[in-house]
Image (spheres, coloured by chain):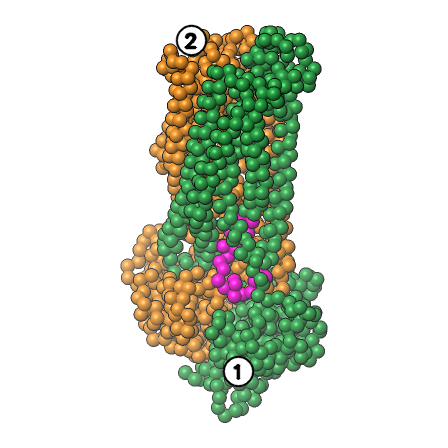
Amino acid sequence: MGLTLISLAANGIMASQPLGEFYVFIYGLDPERFLSVETLSDQARKDLAWPTVYTAIGGALFAVGGTQLLVYYSVWIFQAINQRMRVHLIDQLLAQSLSYHATAQTGDAIYRVYQDTAMVTAIIRYVFLEPFMFIGRYVGGLVIVAAFSPTLALILLVTALPMTYLGRKFSSPLRLKFRSARERNAALTSWIQESVQGIRVIKASGAETERTSEFDKRSHDAFDAAFDSRVSLNVLGILAFVTVAVSMLALQAIAATYTLQDAATFARDLLLAFGFAVWNFGTFSAATSRTSDGFVSLRSIMALWGRAQDMAIGLNRVFSVLDLEPDIVDAENAKPMPALSRSVSFQHVNFGYIDGQTVLHDVNFTASIGSITAIVGPTGTGKSTLMSLLLRLADPDQGCITVDGTDIRDFTVNSLRHGISIATQENILFSESVLNNILYAAPNATRQDAIEAARVVCAHDFIEALPQGYDTALGERAVKLSSGQRQRLVLARAIVRDTPILILDEPTAALDAQTEHDVLANIQVWSEGRCVFLITHRLSTIRQADEVIYLRQGTVLAQGHHDALLALDSGAYKDFVAAETGKGV
Amino acid sequence: MDHSLEHELTPATTAKLIRRSLTFVWPYRRQIAIKVMLSLIAVFLILFLPWPLKILVDHVVMGMPLNETPTPYPPYVIWFVDMLEGLSPYEVIWAIVGIGLFGIVTIGAFGEGGARDAATDELSQGFDTATQSENLANVSNSKVSGLLGLFEFRYQLRTTHRMNHWLRSLLYNRFMSLPMTRFADASIGDAVYRVMYDTPSISRVCYDLTVLPLVNLAMIGGAIWTMQYSFADVPSLIMVAWLAAPMTLLVTLLMTGSARRRSLASRVAGAETTSSLEEGMSNVVAVQSLGANDKQLGKIAAGSRKSFARFLDYTKLTVMLTVVQSVVILGLTFYVFLDVVDALVDDRMSAGDYAVIYTYFFQIAGNAYGLGAIWFELQNNAAGLHRVFEILDTPVDADEHGTEVIAGDVSEVVLHNVSYRYPDGTLALHDIDIHARKGEILALVGSTGAGKTTLAYTLAGLIPPSSGMVTFNDTDIAELSIASLRQQIAFVFQEPFLFDDTVANNIRMGNPNATDAAVEAAAHTAGAYGFISELPNGFSTSLGRAGNTLSVGQKQRLAIARGVVSTASILVLDEPTAALDPETENALVAALNAECNSRILIVIAHRLSTIRSASRIYFLEEGKVIESGTHQELVEAQGAYRRFVDLT
């Protein structure tokens, strides 16, 4: 198409050269006027204008329509891919065990999902689609130019060498710089997020200035890294351009010399039909337009190469998450957990988060159906960890946990967690309505169920007193509620799931005595036919339990009913109770 | 999330936003001026570019003598043509090679080939606003490459970065000094989005309104002037040259309104997705243990899908815009072509002019499109501006505070008739009168939701009372500077928050000047020394995100140590002991008792052992103080407090 236009416009109209047989045939022109003459008449030149315009309009419609459709289609398809990647990535991140989240930064996670998945689609486009297009155009240009003059084609070919050298030379430093830019950006995002999350502490400690100056530093760092990487990319682009431009200049100069000599083209027999047998204005235009197309392609490949270095980093970060095996996976023959009929039992359980550090040491006990088991002990002694193991947030290093005699590792993780409800110590509420917060993990429960659960934990009255009752929206940190109120919502959330096993981690820490008493009394009634675990160190709570497990430094020191343990003459438990009542001081 | 964002911004609001953004240019006026100069040099060079090629075509390839050209060379090219006078065609080729090499090295441009900024092709552009706005912060919009282009690129990038850094810091600062209540409804993801992704909108707008129009107009003007000078014999050329710019502009402007609305929607959806993602990640324990992975995932996936769908709408519009514009430009091109053919045949033009005309039309259309796109971009960025200014305009703590400074310690705190009402109208505190002197321990007691924490916040100046007044040493704390107020207060929150830093630095937040010995002593007092020394690197152990490796009780103790290490004259402990076992708590209370004669200690507690040692107890119910006195007095009074004690 391009050659046709050049032949008609440049050769015919501008240089008055006769056309090739091919065009005369295609456009049905009079050979007398357009083919077998020395130069075209003025009228003949003017007559060529309209065929040229038709051809160009056809080409343009095709090009504009095609490209725009392609743009829309590619946005659509890349979004679809991107969406899949994001979902997969989040799925993977959410499925990681707590040991992973203990070290990963939230901001980093967000950055990965947002920036880096975009990178994957970009890489498909830039690394797989476009290079093929450009290589095709380069090779095409090469072949056509070779037909005009092998010398020119050689110049076009040889130019690829310094380009390859540039690409190799720059890739490693570029990658390093892009990596550092990305990492610093992720660090900055984390920093902002942490600042907003911890705003109360920052204000109360008067640490605003320190935070701000540190922010200043980090933001500077991030921009410096971005500057470095982009300037490098720019330098690469400029060097590539200089290489290409010098070759192109040489090529044009040589082609101009050929026209001065009226030299014959290399494949003149073949080109005769197109009117390019001799070096003249038309030939010059055709040859230079083809070579410049080849050069542009070469330069674009170079630019892609530079960008690919950036993308490789993003890709790496995405795949590092996608390649993570969730620590906790279903056993091969895992089956769903049946309804609880007898007991939950811990058998010689040993566990540590990091190698060499023991959090739990040979823990042994059984909790039977219909009982409340209180797990008691000083801070940091492994009470919450014990319950995480039951939920399979982590697996014991040695020993096992069984439900009705079957190792919980033989159940599917999903069915196990569906059989257990937990009210965590950190009162985490989501930025949704009160009702949705209670129903968060019980999609099939009704509003009535939520109200029942709220009644059990004595939350119904204060919820009703909120501006929109159960439909009141809570902010992300739900600051409007007091700690005790939030705690009760978290309790209701666990109760409403109506599972055979219930874990309450410090359920009453933020409750006053009266509320605590009422809540516990209700739970005691509710616990009929279930296994309830209470993690606590409040005496008033402990007294309501059927069995007390006293943990100290990961070891069970005493086990039995509160009164029975107190009846013993001495022991760690007695000391603990003495301290609780203040008598030990 | 502020729902007002969902609404359409009127042109008047947009104009106001833009006017305001321009005030941010002033500090960078010198840099902008230099950038304009650099760009004008580039404009001149680009205008010169096609002429050597014309010489090559006309006088070498077509063999026309230099002085017989049908169209006059413009004055800024004539010196070069004069130089070539009398040279042989081969020598002319060499001269053109020479000037070509010069062009390549200085501006990285050559012949009619595009002179373009080599790195503008966006990096890592994703189809979402987050990555796009990151690229906004990193563009140079240089029209040339080569040495001049490199210089311009670096210069512009530095300026953009400096401006963005300044804005980011401004916004971050603002976030840090917003009243605590501001965060009740605003989510954290939204804050991150504003600081990271909305701020580049301002630098973009500033550039779009200063440099870009000047350069585009200069380019269009230069091209039209040259065409009038050289091609006066081909009237259709001149007419179309004049028409091209306004027509391209018109088409661009026609379609901006709805485009902007979509981009706004896409941005809001983006922030929403960031929010739910952030929430899911930071509460991963809750999400996992509740078996809610699928639910959380579904929520994020839906949000993300929504944001993509909106972006797709936006793309649809852009595609339509491009098609309409292309048709207009092509139509003009063909019209000109037919006329040019006549001119060529009649020898009013030469073959080489062809290259010049097309380069110039390309520049006129491109720059007119650029001008139209300015409006488009402005509207697009208006949403970002709105979101940035919204934060800058929210009143901050400091606005309500004076500048007085308390020298030395606070020896008396008094609350006079203090009431507090939440922004939603709930009355949390009702006519509270409380006083405390140095050396006293106050205990705030009451059932959950009675207002104890809110009272403590008010007393510490973290939230301003709705009516009444808090005084330190007879000075209204509203008169105090924020810095002076904060200096007097240490607050240990009920829910501990740790930063991603070392243990020692987390404790030292309470007092940046604390020595290592003081930090360790505070850890001892808070009962944290034991477990800290068992950590892999002791006090230098880095805590993960929000201290995830520690148990809640351990985090609480670090938070207490943070309060203890502070030398502030008022120390507030909000339920310090909820997560502590009795042994630790008793040790802590004993230690605090020992040092309380140098400060005022305010404790919110449930445990009797802690309350008993207080100098005075305030018993709260539904936001009112209903009883006060010592433990003994209140027990003997047989009132609400007595009932509370009996239950414990």
Q: Specify the subunit that label 2 lies on.
A: B
Residue at x 54% of width, y 77% of height: A350
- Residue drawn at x 42%, y 67% is B559
Rendered location of residue A97, percent (x, y): 56, 65
* A146 displayed left or right of A339: left
The amino acid type found where label 1 is placed reads Val
Q: Nearer the viewer, residue A513 or B581?
A: B581
Both marks 1 and 2 on one chain: no
Which mark's residue is nearer the viewer, 1 or 2?
Answer: 2
The colour assigned to chain B within the rendered structure: orange
Q: Badge 1 local density, few (<14 within 10 Å), some, or many (20+)?
A: some
Q: Which quadrant holds the C terminus of chain A? A: bottom left
Residue B430 shows in the view:
no
Q: Which residues are magenta?
A: A94-118
Check the picture and name the quadrant holding the N terminus of chain A: top right
Question: Which residue is disc 2 drawn over?
Answer: B67
Secondary structure beneath dot 2 equals helix
Q: Position of residue B638 (x, y in %)?
A: 50, 78
Crowding at mark 2 (Cα within 10 Å: few <14, some 14-19, many 20+): few
Q: Colour of chain A?
A: green
**Residue drawn 43% across and 84% down?**
A584
For mark 1, name the chain.
A
In the picture of the structure, the residue carrying the numbered disc 1 is A556
Circle 1 SS class: strand
